[in-house]
Amino acid sequence: IFLTLKDFNPDEIKHILWMSADLKHRIKHEGQYLPLLQGKSIAMIFEKRSTRTRMSTETGFSLLGGHPCFLTPQDIHLGVNESIKDTASVLSGLTDMVLARVYSHSTLEQLDKEASIPIINGLSDLYHPIQILADLLTLQEHYGSLRGLTVAWIGDGNNILHSLMMSLAKLGVNLRIATPKGYEPDASITREAQHLFKQFGTELQLFSEPLEAARGSNVLVTDTWVSMGQEEEKTKRLKDFQGYQITMQTGRVASPDWTFLHCLPRKLEEVDDEVFYSPHSLVFPEAENRKWTIMGLMACILTDYTPETPKLKL
């Protein structure tokens, strides 16, 4: 199962990234065909729409020889016209794996409890772990190694941030967080993260000033300020996040080698065009790596494939 990176140790995360890099090298750069998932199928449940999660999973599973089945709320009303328990039992008999993109994390936990096949979190209100795998591979490719990097999160205390908090320490990465007052990450996740960062000897710092978080950081990261389901709060949120837009001025206080990440879709108030389309921006390699990392994860779960390329320096 893959519900949150909280459940994975450093070696397990590194193995998924190695598998992802190996598949990317062999398939994209060497043109090999690797039907590792031939005869396998995946049910993709989407309560929330998505470009990258859907396309990366569909194309990635197909590229490995498997068959993806896409299910919208019009196709499958989780817990409405059929209970989650019954849905989990049915899909367990029909497919080899489920990726579910849901509103509530408890839906994933219930699916996992009732299913006899692996469940992947395609996004929930608490976590978005498959996005973080893509971010980590992108940074590894750019910097050559992750250990010792400092990531600055400037924005909302949301599911992406929670997943960064549950993973970066395990790879030797420091995290500096700036959120407006009232938009801090979940308190229980913050407590757990503080323990993790202490355990692995890395730094976790929380600020309310964006430039404080950005100062000396290698990576500047943000995300949408208004997620799906928060549209009614838009006016208030835009007001509360004033001063949080990432610009070249933010980059000036960062490390000289700074880069920018955004999981997309992006709005102009979050980051200006000058940064978003600059050489500092890794957003499009990051988006592509959603495919290679979901492929690596699915191959890790469903096969005993061992990568052939050298292990990544992480």
Image (cartoon, rainbow, N blue to C red):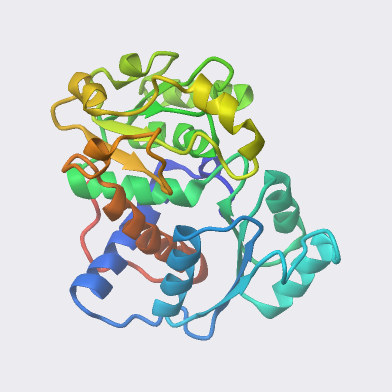
- The quadrant where residue 181 appears: top right
Q: Would residue 150 be found to the left or right of residue 235 on screen?
A: left
The residue positioned 71% from the left and 50% from the top of the image is 109
The residue positioned 27% from the left and 74% from the top of the image is 27
The answer to whether one can see residue 260 in this image is yes
The N terminus, quarter of image: bottom right
Residue found at the far left of this picture: 256
Pick whichever, 87 or 225, lies toward us.
Answer: 225
- The quadrant where residue 202 appears: top left
> Residue 122 placed where, x, y %?
55, 55
The C terminus, quarter of image: top left
> Residue 270 placed where, x, y %?
39, 33
Pick whichever, 171 or 69, lies toward us.
Answer: 69
Q: Would residue 260 be found to the left or right of residue 71 on screen?
A: left
The residue positioned 53% from the left and 86% from the top of the image is 39
The residue positioned 26% from the left and 17% from the top of the image is 215
Q: Would residue 128 be found to the left or right of residue 245 on screen?
A: right
- The quadrant where residue 272 appears: top left
Instruction: Give above or below for 122 relative to 76.
Output: above
> Residue 199 placed where, x, y %?
44, 24
> Residue 51 placed where, x, y %?
47, 60
Q: How many labels does the image show?
A: 0
Instruction: Give above or below for 63 relative to 159.
Output: below
The answer to whether one can see residue 195 in this image is no
